[in-house]
Image (tube, coloured by chain):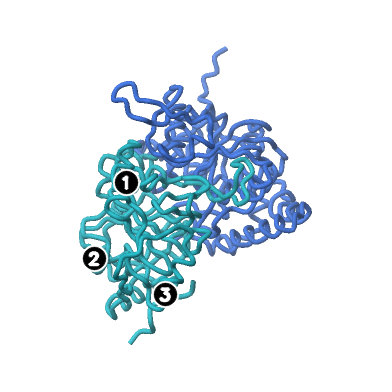
Chain colours: A blue, B cyan
Amino acid sequence: MLNQVRKSALLPEEKAGQWVKSGMTIAIGEPAPMGLLRWIIRNKITDLTVIGSGMALDYLIAGGCVRKVVTYYAGSPDTAVMPAFRSEAENGSLEVWECEEGILTSGLEAAGKGLPFMPWRGGVGTSLPDINADLKVIRDPIGGEVLIAVPAIDIDITLLHASISDSYGNVQHCRGTGWLDMFLYRAADRVIVQVEKIVSNEEIRSKPWETTISNADAIVLSPYGAHPFYSRGYYVQDQEYIQAYLEAIKAAYSKGSRDDKDDYFETHCNRFQSHAEYLDAIGMGHLISLSEY
Amino acid sequence: MSSPATIKELMAVVLSRELEDGDHLQVGVALPVPEVAVRLAHIMHGPNMQLIFLGARMNVHHLESIPLPTFGWDSRSVRWAESYSDRGHRFDQVKAWHKRVFFVGGLQVDKFGNINLIGIGDDPKKLKFRGPASVGTPTLTTHVGRYYIVLNNHTSRVLVSECDYVSAVGWHEGGTDARKKLGIPGGGPKLCVTPLCVMDFTEIEKRMRLVSLHPGVTLDEVKANTGFELVIPDIVPTTLVPTEDELTILRSRVDLSGILRSR
């Protein structure tokens, strides 16, 4: 019999998290959906190929989940090179698919459009095609120019953080999406979006032009879910927490201490059974102090 | 009188004088010297400049001060923007990038202004020093009208005879047609500004050439700290220090927290 009730996209974090299996290719949007990333680390998902950048990417590497990264930037204004990325790339245990912003967006665009590749000029003459054998230097069949063919970058699951959604997966970002979010969404088989707030379908319908993603596969309610990063219109980045992460992980890697690293993740991630428990530990007072104004 | 300019303040002022009204100035993250330079130029002589930070475009000439954000990923830093290329369309108007000016640092830079942000070591799968990766610099340096190389350190480990890897092509193997031969259209690197000196590129060979020495820096010091043979003109002036006006505006209307004074 036909079920006449429209299906809800709302899922508890652990249900959506279980979609992510070891060995998959996942992508992390901006700001990073940290609630989901903490779930992935806590549940010991490994051997992931991760499209991401900065500290969120580093967090997953340090958490032991990553075999290969597709990244254009593993630094931040707070540190020249992210500590786990640097150490694991230098000792050869982390594979790096060397690219840059224009090349990455080209590969994602190819995937989203169902094309085998997309040509791009940025990177011509550089070492990028030498280091990354997937990037092919080609001659344009029309004008004869030398370009780089970037293969489609297909993603199993894209994980995003946004402001609001209704229960049907109609997502609206406050003040714009993260710069890669739409590329990552279009290149993925499935997208999970964690949001600050679930709103009514009527609220979405009152401003449909603000809908950024109209059919998310799963919506996870995750207030403060981007912590320690920002969420536009809600809270700013927690600089102290980020500095503490960088110092702890840098120290753990320079000592070569697995225990120190494990201690960090036990304290900040693994001991919590849920996102709510994590927020309890951070504390309401501290969270309120991060309010964006 | 203000206390004398720090080296970083001097570098910012050198860059700000280079910028022309009407320029579209794009600054990436973790580059405080150009971040100050573009704001200073915008206040002092750039009512028609556009500042582009992380996809946000702004003209904030009317503001009394244009302070640096207190930290890099401050979501509030786009609040004075006129537009924000949020939908990933940041690279969709490459055609207009001849108006754009960009700034780039590097782990290594060679005498033709080629830059390495990838890393150092023979084996790219196991680098001795793993760099942060190329960000958007290959694409930006390919297309922008001109760009400036800004280095935090001037040593022979940074200014090298040959980069281990090239993430952004400057003048490749030299010559005015070097970029054209590769098929990359932009105007290439214009200056390289370091804590010791200002350098440009010779007209024909496009080799790096000394332009001026910062106050108190000797020619020998620059030579000893440069890993390739720099072109040295007959007359090497001292870099013009910031005027009282430039320094006052820099400190009171841009770098309010003193980032260029403390580092």
**Upstream in the sequence, badge 3 or badge 1?**
1
Image disc number at residue A83 = none
For disc 2, the marked residue is B62
| Chain that bears disc 1 | B
In this view, which residue lies farthest toward the bottom? B1
Mark 2 → mark 1, Cα distance in angstroms: 42 Å
For disc 3, the marked residue is B218
Q: Are marks 2 and 1 on the same chain?
A: yes
Q: In the depicted view, which residue is nearer to us: B167 or B35?
A: B167
Number of the front mark, 2 or 3:
3
Number of the front mark, 2 or 1:
1
Q: Horizontal and vertical percent for residue B118?
A: 52, 47
Mark 3 → mark 1, Cα distance in angstroms: 29 Å
Mark 3 closeness class: few <14, some 14–19, many ≥20 residues within 10 Å: few
With respect to residue A293, does A143 lie above or below? above
With respect to residue A40, does A190 lie above or below? above
| Chain that bears disc 3 | B
User: How many numbered callouts?
Assistant: 3
Asked whether, in this view, residue A81 is left or right of residue A65, the answer is: left
Name the residue at 36% across, 30% down: A146
With respect to residue A202, does B1 lie above or below? below
Mark 1 closeness class: few <14, some 14–19, many ≥20 residues within 10 Å: some
In this view, which residue lies farthest toward the front? B234
Image disc number at residue B175 = 1
Residue B201, visible in the rendered structure: yes
Name the quadrant of the N terminus of chain A. top right
**Upstream in the sequence, badge 2 or badge 1?**
2
